[in-house]
Amino acid sequence: MARKKNDSKTAAGTAATAEIVRQPITETIEKNFMPYAMSVIVSRALPAIDGFKPSHRKLLYTMYKMGLLGGDRTKSANVVGQTMRLNPHGDQAIYATLVRLTRGNEALLHPFIDSKGAFGKHYSSDMDYSAARYTECRLDRLCNEIFTGIDRDAVDMVDNYDNTMKEPALLPTTFPNILVSANQGIAVGMASQLCGFNLGEVCDTTIAYLKNPDCDLTETLLAPDFPTGGEVICDVDALREIYSTGRGGVKVRARWRYDKKENLIEVYEIPYTTTTEAIMDKVAELIKAGKVKEITDMRDETDLNGLKLTIDLKRGTDPDKLMQKLMKSTTLQDTMSCNFNVLIAGMPRVMGVRELLDEWCAWRTECVRRRVYFVMSKKKDKLHLLKGLKRILLDIDKAIKIIRETEAEADVVPNLMIGFGIDQVQAEYVAEIKLRNINKEYILKRVEETSALQDEIEDLEDILARPARVKKIIVAELEDVRKKYAEPRRTGIVYGHEVEEYTEETTVDDYAVSVFLSREGYFKKITPASLRMNAEQKYKEGDALAQSFETSNAAEVMFFTDRCQVYKSRLSDFDDTKASALGDYLPAKLGMDEGESVVYMVLPGDYRGWMLFFFENGKAAKVELSAYRTTSNRRKLTGAYSDKSPLRTALCLREDCELAVYSTEPRVLVFSTALLGSKTTRATQGVAVLTLKKKFTLDYACPAEATGIANLARYRARSLPAVGALLKVEDSDEKQISLMD
């Protein structure tokens, strides 16, 4: 709903009242939300085919107009202030954009801004950049390639936000910057994540594509390249997926060396997606948890020479095995996710590399054609003037006579037009010629120039008429860019079979234990010997036993919670305790969400059997236990069961049996679990089991043999759903308490 304020007179004065105006939610979204969402998508968050977001484009164009391409550096604060004429979003936002484009920040393979001063580092969240008044900048040499033809109508010029200036809609880059510069943007309902590729490889790939659109891109575009270096773990199938769809991920790992003399490891290149602080925090966490015992110290020794993380090792430590463990457990090995979402003609599109090259080549072709046409038009205008001059120079005496005999200055041009049969533009040009230029040498040079111009115009017209020549120009520019600016790959390439994965060699003592779970979430693991000495369990006041099992120390355990989540662990992760102790408080031990509590414990074993969930609405879900098996080290699974109705009972069954379901009426239904079809989807809503009357709900479920009901046949059903039968008094004496109570 929307509110409209009106002024109304009261005895106390004027007061504001609100009139409620009813409006469909679809209309509210269409009028209020959609314009904002489209503005973020089109004008802020996503890059266009030139590889720049609007903020990047406005900043670089401002610096270009300031004469900072090839000029001296100026204070960054000056650039920020000038950019606000095009980008009124605040100086801090503009400066943050400038910082990322600088050479000093090391966020780009080929920076666009040559910087001086402290601009922070992309790979460190703690190394912040200095204020704009302390740093200096200018455009880097590479910007010669992104402004080629901008003053020759290569791209459209549009009004700025207040219609006081013109700015380019796109920058006429001579190479596919969209594939070279890494870019990330979060819009409304969509996002973009572009990884960078090596400039030389991109140029070679584009040339190959122009010659043969069906070429194999993987032959020239080997893999993503990142300014932070590292090594790409190359998966050809994954790369082909990225190249064809624009979506996927590529694994990148750090580079390191071992100093045998000092017994330490130096990490000098890390994945582009992480920071030194994130790596060190995770390593510290592993050391604190006792999962990494080979490290005595770790410190950040990054200096002017570059990044360096130093790890001191204990004597006898195998550095290769340690780094394999750290690669698996920390962001020393990380995945760069790709989402090539790009604005094409103002519309967002997710495209693969081949589609991007196709769009860029089409757009670049138009840029070149517009540039050629602009140059040709200027030459035609000049030729037109020279043709008029030629006619005058053939009879200069006549021209002088006309000028001399014309009484009024305003009549000079009309008289020349009549005397020589030329138009006004030609006559104006002739009339402005200096007297000193009326000589034989000047006349001969102009005649020769006319002939040369005519040849140049014919050549330019031929270019516009023949697409092959336009393509040749694009290829020549790409070859020139590669020759001038291409650099060797910073990110190495290794293949999956060359990488030795870490396999945890943990030995767990396997011995018999008994486990106990209380209703308030306290967990105990007790050995048989300890139980024989004292079997009486201690609980907090108001707490009691919920579940208990006899098992082994090496077994796996799952804890289902009231937030539709399940936490997995091994019993070996819990310390042995005594019956007299309260035990481990699971919400704290497992790092549960605030207010989250355990409702059911399961020992999955070999994951054979089912989990049965009974919901308040009378439905039951039978989920295969194997649906909770994980191949990774994930310890928390969301969507463990359906959240469409409150859970009343959870049961784990190894084989089908008869269950009794109670309602609040009270009614009882006894049925075989074989009537329920099993599902592999954990969050399935299940099927109706108990048909409920209004105001009544499903109360709980339990094995039929545990109910104490003498005549089970009275309550048994052969098909589902069923209403059950009213509970007799004699059958209610042995009522079982639900695990959810």
Image (cartoon, rainbow, N blue to C red):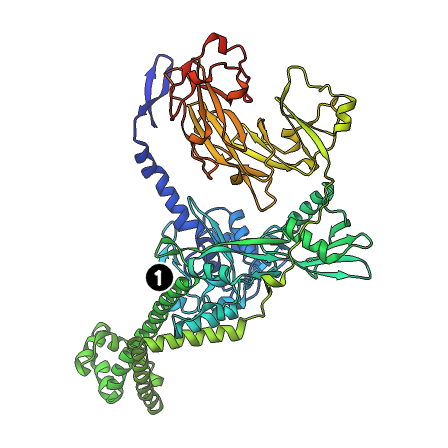
The x and y percentages for residue 727 are 45, 12
Task: Residue 649 in the image: state x and y as whole percent.
Answer: 51, 24
Q: Nearer the viewer, residue 624 or 505?
A: 624
Amino acid type of the residue tagged 1 in the rendering: Asp
Quarter residue 376 falls in = bottom left
Residue 207 lies, with reference to residue 282, above or below; the image says below
Depth order, front residue of 20/427:
20
- The image quadrant that residue 383 belongs to is bottom left
- Examine the rendering and report whether any part of residue 432 can be seen: no
Camera-side residue of 499 and 608: 608
Label tally: 1
The quadrant in which the C terminus is found is: top right
Give the residue at x 22% y 76%: 412
Q: Is residue 369 left or right of residue 87?
A: left
Q: Is residue 544 left or right of residue 721?
A: right
Mark 1 element type: loop
Q: Is residue 259 left or right of residue 92?
A: right
Quadrant placement of the N terminus = top left
Which residue is at a point 58% across and 46% down the rendered structure image? 631
- Image coordinates of residue 122 in percent, x first then y, are 60, 54
Q: Is residue 451 at least partly visible in the picture?
A: yes
**Residue 70 place in picture, x, y as percent:** 53, 68
Identify the residue position indicated by label 1 in the image.
156
465 relative to 97, above or below: below
Front residue of 317/698: it is 698
Is 297 situated above or below 584? below
Crowd tier of the residue under label 1, counting other residues whose Cα lies within 10 Å: few below 14, some 14–19, many 20 or above: some
Residue 485 position by quadrant: bottom right
